[in-house]
Amino acid sequence: MDRSTVETLFAHSAEIRCLVVGDLMLDEYLWGKADRISPEAPVLVVDVVREELRLGGAGNVVNNLAALGAQVSVCSVVGDDRNGRELLGQFCYHHIDTRAIFQDPERRTSRKTRVVAAHQQIVRIDRESRDALPAAVEQQLCAWIAANAKEFKVIVLSDYNKGVVTPAVIASVISAAAAINIPVLVDPKGTDYARYGGATLLTPNRKEAEAASGIHITDTASLAQAAEVIMNVAGLSHLLVTRSEEGMSLFSRENGVVHIPTVAREVFDVSGAGDTVLAALAVGIAAGFTMAEAARLANVAAGIAVGKLGTSIVTPQEIIDTVSRAHKDSYAKIKSLDVLVGLMTAEKSRGKRIVFTNGCFDLLHAGHVKYLQKARSLGDLLILGLNSDTSVRRLKGPKRPLIDQDERAHLLAALDCVDYVVVFDEDTPLELITALEPHILAKGGDYSLDQVVGRDLVEANGGRVELVDFVDGKSTTNIIERILELYSV
C-alpha cells in the first residue's frame, strides 16, 4: 500500500455510503489535575479543568467513518432522555444521518464518564442499560434495515452487548446484505459467534478470539487453530484478529493467512482502537480494496489511534502521512489525477503558477534533467505527465519502454525540479491538461506551436505555451545505439 493508492481512496471516500448498526453511548471526559489526597478518604482529589463529550460505542465507529470522509447512517435505539437528546445533537453536529435512530421512553441512554488526570484515567463511571430491545422496537429496526439496505455499500455491526444487536437484528442485517451482495463487518461480543453466521468478516481481538474458540493463543499455530474454530462456527470467509503489539492476522478461506506487523509508535490508550479498525476496514472494502489491503489500511489507522488519549478519530491526512513515512520521499510526489486536481486548486488559490509538461522519459539522461529544470523555472510548480507503459508502446513500438512506468515515475519524482508526477494511458496528455488547467504548457523545442496538444485550452484560460530547447546530442535513442555499438557481438 503506497501513498498514491491511499490518496486516491480518500479523494473518493465521499462516494461511500455506510450503515452502522449497534449500541450507542456518550463518552464523557473530565480532564483535571490531581495533586492532593482527600481529607475525607485516602483518594485523589481531581480538580476538573475541562469537560468533553464524545460519541461512544458504535458512535465512535460512526465518528471514525465520517472522519475518513464516508457518508454514514446510524441504526440504533436510545432513550427519550437528556443523554439521548445530547447524543442525537452530537450526530446532527457532525452531519450524520439519524433517521434510523429510534427513541424508546423506557430505555436509559448509556453514558460513560471518565475522570482523567496526569494523562491517565483515575476512574470510570458507567450509567447504562443492557436490556434487550422490546419486540416492537426490535421490529422497527429490522423493518428499516430490510427496506433501506440497498442505499449502502457496506454495513457495520458494532456490538457492545448493550441490547441493540439482538439475534433478530443480526439476522435482518445479514439477510438484507446478502440479497444485494454487500459486505457485513462485525465487531463481535460474547462467546457465541454462531449468532453472526453469514457475516463477511469478524474483528475480535486476541482475548475475544480465545474466549470464543476455547483455545489459549500462545503462538501462530494456536492462533490458526482458534481462527479455524471461529470461522467454522460462524461460517466465515474472513476473520481479522487484532493482536495488540503483534499487529493483526487476516485469515481467509481462499488466500490463507496474512500476518500484518504493527506500526511502531508510543501507545497512550487502546480504547476505541477496535472501532478505528472497523471503520478503516469498511472504507477500504467499500472502495474495492482486497481484504488484505483493507486490513493493512486498518492497521495503519489503529497505530495512529492508540497514540491518542481516549476514543479519538483518525484523519485521512494522518494515514497518508504515516504511509508516506514507510516509503521513500518519491512516493509523496506521485499522484493520481483526482488527487492532483484538488492539490492544484489549493495551490492556485495561493497564487502559485503551475507549469505542465509531459513525455515518456525512458532512460533518464542529462538532456531530460536540463529540460525539466528549464521548464520548472517558468513557474512555481512543475507537474510532469508521464506516458504509461502501454502508451509508450503505442507511440514507440513493442520494444519500448526499456524502464517500466513505476521506475520512471520514481526516478523523475526524485528530481528537485519536479513537484508532481502523474501517469496517463492516453496517447496525448489532453485529458490531464483539461483537468489541471496549468498556467504554462512546456514542450520541447522540436515542436512547433501548432503541434502542441492542449495549446488552445491553455491560451483560452489566459495561459501560454513555452518551447524549451533540448540539449544537443542527448537522447534515449542515442544511448540505445551506443550500447548496441559497444556490446553487440
Image (cartoon, helix red, strand yellow):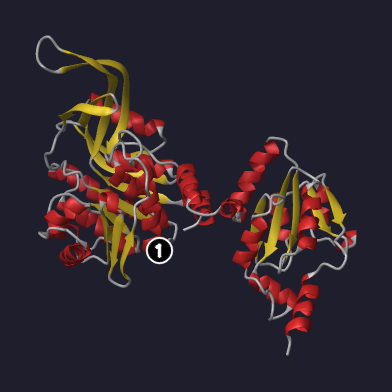
Residue 192 at least partly seen? no
Identify which amino acid the numbered label 1 is placed on: Thr
Q: Quadrant of the C terminus?
A: bottom right
Q: For residue 251, what is the image quadrant?
A: bottom left
In the image: residue 265, left or right of residue 332: left
Q: Which residue is mark 1?
A: 290
**Image coordinates for residue 100, horizontal then vertical, percent:** 30, 42
Residue 236 at least partly seen? yes
Is 193 or 242 nearer to us in this picture?
Answer: 242
As drawn, 113 above or below 359:
above
Residue at 39% over, 50% down: 300
Residue at 87% over, 56% down: 467
Is 485 or 165 nearer to us in this picture?
Answer: 485
**Image coordinates for residue 396, horizontal then vertical, percent:** 74, 76
Q: For residue 413, what is the image quadrant?
A: bottom right
Q: Residues within 10 Å of mark 1 (few under 14, many from 20)?
A: few
Q: For residue 64, what is the image quadrant?
A: top left
**How many labels sit on residues?**
1
In the image: residue 55, left or right of residue 365: left
**Image coordinates for residue 334, horizontal then vertical, percent:** 60, 55
**Image coordinates for residue 163, horizontal then vertical, percent:** 15, 43
Residue at 13% over, 38% down: 130
Q: Say which element carries label 1.
A: loop
Residue at 62% over, 50% down: 340
